[in-house]
Amino acid sequence: MKNIIVNFTIIYLLLFASSCTKVDQIIYDAPTPTSAIKTQADIDNAIGGIYAKLNAWDCFKEQSFTTLPYADDLSSTATNNTGIWAARIGVNAGVANSLNVWKSFYACIANANAVIGYTETTKITDAYKTKARAEAKFLRGLAYFYLVQYYGGVPITTTVFNGSTELNPSRASVDSVYQLILSDFKEATIGLPTRLVQPSSEFNRATQGAAYGYLAKANLTYANFLNLNNRSSESTKYYTDAKAAADFIINSGQYSLMADYSKLWDVAQEKAAYSEVMFGIAYTRDAVTTNVVSEGSGWAAFYNPSTRPNVSGNGALKTGNGVYKVQPWFYERYTTGEFVNDYRVETSFLTSWNNTSAKLSITFPYVPAVGVVVGASESQPYINKYIDPNGVALQSNENDLFLLRFSEMYLIKAEAENELNGPTVDAFSAFNAVRARARKANGTVRIAPADLTLTNAPTKQAFRMKIFDERGLEFVGEFNRWFDLVRMRASDDKTTMYEYQYATFLPTLVAGLPTYNGTTRTWSTGRTEKTNIVPFDKKYLLFPIPTNELSVNNKMIQNPGW
């Protein structure tokens, strides 16, 4: 990791008059030299620099996660934007996305290490020192948590970068990386404020709840790793710790499930969503810099059709650009069986809209009423969670990226308890809390999805598959799917869900995309878009170590298969 640059930034607080913009939105910009770190305010500005890197184009804004929808099994891309990740063709260690992900998270780590170091040399109160260290360690743990999931064992650095820093570190073991992650999150749980007492000026920054939430998630993921590597005797401790951390949050009174699932995605009420959102990446409309380095997000454009108006800041008609689409089989999975009439489906997916020509556009599997004229039909549904009619550019919309929600604490608890003891009353109770919220719909209670019972999940393996399916719907479009595929075991207890999906399940589906017949008002039988349904290859369980890193560090070893 040669030439690591510690790039601190000054915080600017911009308040907008529009009722649809979030208040207390913190904007990070303008580099400042590390020699300026002399006071408590300087350290706080430096912490803001870490958040700035997380918000940036080469991290969560685009590069870190544009790869994930392409790499999972539920998403595909528009035919004019298939990309090498979608087809897995041409993906190699030289792909820019992988390099940008690597660099951005290590920049966060370098900045966090610097903040931790400066708390020892700057005149600050003991209380502030505890908080600053905790926040920096949370952010460092977060960066390493994503790195270890993407790449496996990665180099560990925990000191301020200086002239004596090792420029060619070896890859640490996965175990060592997780021990650092867990240690960082544990310290963060002690030093960070709770959500209810967090100053309004620090809205969108880490809280004790975020630290406990990621502590639960990291313990669960590490326990999964141990099981998949024939080390089940070691996993018990981490499943136990995952459940304990999730339980702490569930019983803390700090968070609650929003009664109406759809309100989570109402950009005009986004701040209220943080009663459920435990950690998110903040974005705001930026009319000054409207390109990829703007302070806004691009999800509203990426996930919406190019013919749907008033959904983002893209162009005069404020349309989407249709980059991400949903595999037909995935939508069908959640409109059949136990998920029929699940409110989350109609909230999360888009299958019909009035297009820019004021005509009806539809996608699979929507069938209009008799006599209704269809202006255009498409084969794949879209994600409907990200909409900002007041966006100012394609990549300058208000929508935050919710990385961790309270509903996940219930599903983590259910999964950990199931792995420890099988489908117990405790596991069902946690799981069914998520379904109970779904049944509330928008105020008119429904009967679906019904509570899960021993009848339909009688074994640990069966319950695990139910959790996998539930997570697929609850978090669709929130960048969890690929991580779930590569971390969770299939019902054979040996292989990943990724292998099960690509080697066993997906090959059974009818190949090709469905097409609509207006005369018969039916869709043809194809259920898969080919670029994302590829033969299983275990190398895709990890991303490649970037070529640039390999070329400057002769101790670095590439991941298998790449």
Image (spheres, rainbow, N blue to C red):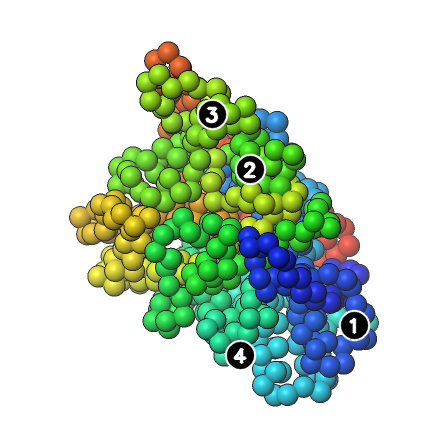
In this rendered view, identify the residue nearer to me: 192 or 188.
192
Q: Which residue is mark 2?
A: 310
In this rendered view, identify the residue nearer to me: 284 or 61.
284
**128 above or below 164?**
below
User: Could you tell me which residue is drawn at 40 percent across and 32 percent down?
Assistant: 329
Q: Amino acid at mark 4?
A: Gly
Q: Earlier in the sequence, mark 2 or mark 1?
A: 1
Image disc number at residue 325: none
User: Could you tell me which residue is drawn at 59 percent across and 65 percent down?
Assistant: 24
User: Could you tell me which residue is drawn at 60 percent across and 62 percent down?
Assistant: 25
Foreground disc of the pair 3, 1:
3
Q: Which residue is mark 4?
A: 191
Image disc number at residue 34: 1
Indicate the quadrant where residue 116 lies. Answer: bottom right
Marks 1 and 4, how far apart in space? Answer: 24 Å
Secondary structure state at the residue bearing disc 2:
loop
- The reply to whether callout 3 and callout 1 are in contact (CB within 8 Å) is no
Q: Amino acid at mark 3?
A: Ser
Q: Earlier in the sequence, mark 3 or mark 1?
A: 1
